[in-house]
Image: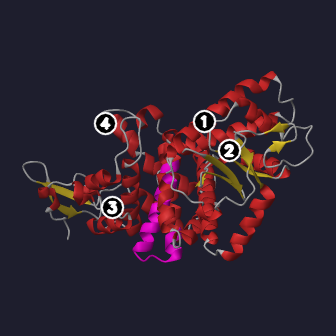
Amino acid sequence: MADNLKITGDGAENVGEFGRGYSEKLQTLARGLVSSLYMLVRSVKMYDPENAVFEKPLLQLQGIVNQIISKEGRLELVGVKDSFYLNNMLVKVDLNSIENQRFLLGEMRAKDVGGISLLKPVTVPDLKNFIWIFSKEQSAAAEEDGMAGRKLLNMKVAKFSKLREKLNKDDLENPDEQKVDRKKYAMTVYARAVFFLTRYLESVQAGKPLSTAKALRLVQDFVDISSEQKTHFLGMTTTKREADYLVYHQVNVCLMCIVFGQELGLTKPQLRDLGYIALFHDAGMVTIPDELATKRGALSAEEKALIQKAPLISVRNILMEKGFSRSTLLRVVTTFEHKADFGTAVRDARGNIQMIIPKTNLGVYAKIIAICDAYDALTSKRPYRDAYGPEVALMLMWTEMRNKFDPELLQVFMRVMAIQPVKVLSRRQQTMSLGGL
């Protein structure tokens, strides 16, 4: 039993394996684990671990730990640079929790704790002995099996000094580690974009829009990263929160537009302009009442008119910024145009689209944003419907919504997303010709 909970320091951690696929259920448990450890380590600086205030938090931590072990068969939490990895998966914390994570990492490293590992369910006494490591009475660094007189039975503690040696060695011997760093940097930029856009939308609601100029640096970072991290870059767009739909939607559309634009051969300056416009393409929607934006069923004529004002509000916000240039004009036109349908659908007696008659000549930026905007909206969960799968979303765009998009660009987008919706279409739908080709 004594081998079940110790501080690991034998170099068994395979740092090169970090980067396991994203799991929403495990992410939720991981965030709870890090949050609970932060609260306990912070509290033990003020109270004795035997204090009654620790009873409930320790029970909660025990529940989280044992859920992870039950699900995964093991628990390995390791602090690498500025992040935590749980069972080789990067733990993605909210922007508001980054400082808490840094505090926890700092306290752990001060005690030479690089992480913890467990193979069997943990007990509250074991967790209490682990928290003792960080108490104000303790001045010595932790050993792999805890502190003298308070040994760990079901845990193993990773010595930070040994983990750091291994990380430094891997940095020299494994240049691929730089790719991992780029992925982590991409997530950092993503978090910054979410934070900035949240503040911007709040300012729009208050009627005093912030300057968007600072976002240019974020968009340029996205452009620089996307060329070498395309797969991971698109993977970030699966990060969605129903409560903050508008923020995540606009950031995700920005990312998809950049990758899509690369496939179309746009230059880096063009990608920056495209991403910059896409990042704020739906900002006017923040002024629409929540009950209307999430309404189930059909909208009345008055409600539709109110929704249709959203692009105009986005345009107004652009015009309220200082200065007016060619770039400003491009932003205004694209923001307004992306809501326009590409063409008029000509349907047969059964209501199926047989041909698309193009309307006005829309700008390429507007046509790109329209496709990415619709795809992200369809694959996002909304209060009035569940999220559609990628194949189903593209099937709807290919058939029922086909008049809204440039058919040639839509085909390229399908290739970029590596998803072909024809496998879920009927035989007849698969043979339908695209209007305009």
Spatial CA distance of label 4 from label 1 is: 54 Å
Q: Would you say the residues marked 4 and 3 are in contact, meaning their CB atoms lie under 8 Å apart?
A: no
Q: Assign a secondary structure to mark 2.
A: helix
Mark nearest the camera among 2 and 1 is 1
Q: Would you say the residues marked 2 and 3 are in contact, meaning their CB atoms lie under 8 Å apart?
A: no
Q: Residues within 10 Å of mark 3 (few under 14, many from 20)?
A: few
Question: What residue is shown with label 4?
Answer: 301
Is residue 269 one of those drawn in magenta? Answer: yes
Q: Nearer the viewer, residue 125 or 184?
A: 125
Q: Position of residue 339 (x, y in %)?
A: 37, 54
Q: Nearer the viewer, residue 360 or 139?
A: 139
Spatial CA distance of label 2 from label 4 is: 40 Å
Spatial CA distance of label 2 from label 3 is: 35 Å
- Which quadrant would residue 38 be assigned to in this image? top right
Is residue 257 one of those drawn in magenta? Answer: yes
Question: What residue is shown with label 3?
Answer: 419
Which numbered marker is on residue 224? none
Q: Position of residue 215 (x, y in %)?
A: 61, 60
The quadrant of the rendering that contains the N terminus is top right
Q: Assign a secondary structure to mark 1.
A: helix
Relative vertical location of residue 405 with respect to residue 43 in this rendering, above or below: below
Mark nearest the camera among 2 and 3 is 3
Q: Amino acid at mark 4?
A: Ala
Mark nearest the camera among 4 and 3 is 3
* Residue 315 visible in this rendered orientation of the protein: no
Q: Which residues are magenta?
A: 248-272
Question: What residue is shown with label 1?
Answer: 66
